[in-house]
Image (tube, rainbow, N blue to C red):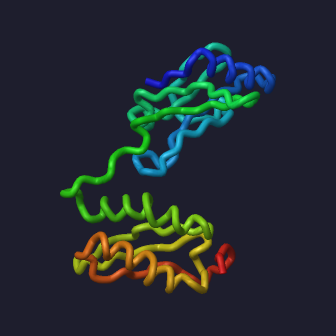
Amino acid sequence: MFNITDEAQTYVANLFAQQSEEGLGLKVDVEKANTPVAAVTFNFCYEKDLGKVYSKFEYKGFNAFIDENNFDYLKDSEVSLKEEGSNKKLTITAPNAKGEPPKEDAPLEEKIKYTIVAEINPQLASHGGFVELVKITKEFDVVLNFGGGCQGCSSVKITLKNGVEAQLKSIYPEIKNILDYTDHSQKENAYM
């Protein structure tokens, strides 16, 4: 399921040896699994701090802990050591982490969520913002909630109309309106 090459195991084991802390392990997670922006992360952890959903895998010099919910996403994955000059870094190939785009006959909600994650949020991320789908009404109004730098931003109406709405309506012509559900009175993290 989750293969770590011998070279990568030696590299990771050396990192653990430098920590000299008893009971330290490697927690492997998949952030935003089954989306185009999925990423596999590695973090130091203590087994006692993990929930019951984590399974233990023993490697040379360290233990890795993987959330059972991520097993399918990490199937056929491999961690290897890449050398660039005098630098070494771990790389992972996880062909099942990102999932696939929704099929043509998928529900509209699933397709819109995918478009938001794959196309819209990466654009908004440059300003520290994001948007999420709240619901789709019976009348095909799409209700969104902005967060991060978009919440309270003075340009959010322009972003909504010229950016998000234009993009979603061009892909999904059945959408009637795009509605903003966000409380924009909170301006602590606003981009502008």
Q: Report whether 96 appears left or right of 37.
A: left
Total residue callouts? 0
Residue 53 shows up from this direction? no
Q: Is residue 33 above or below residue 82?
A: below
Residue drawn at point x = 30 percent, y = 70 percent: 171
Which of the 4 image quadrants contains residue 144?
A: bottom left
Query: Which residue is pictured at 42% across the width and 64% down the height?
Result: 116
Q: What's the residue at 30%, 64% (across, down)?
A: 109
Question: Percent from the top left, x then y, of residue 123?
Answer: 52, 66
Res. 112 visible in picture: yes
Quadrant holding the N terminus: top left
Nearer to me, 140 or 52: 140
Q: Quadrant of the C terminus?
A: bottom right
Q: Horizontal placement of 33 versus 170: left or right?
A: right
Q: Is residue 42 above or below residue 33?
A: above
State whether residue 128 is above or below residue 68.
Answer: below
Asked whether 85 or 189 is in front, the reply is 85
Question: Would residue 176 be found to the left or right of residue 1 on screen?
Answer: left
Please name the residue shown 48% across and 25% down the image. 2
Quarter of the rendering containing residue 153 = bottom right
Q: Position of residue 191 (x, y in %)?
A: 65, 76
In the rendered image, residue 58, in percent from the top left (x then y), is placed at 57, 17
Residue lying at the far left in this picture: please name it. Answer: 105
- Residue 37, position in %: x, y? 48, 51
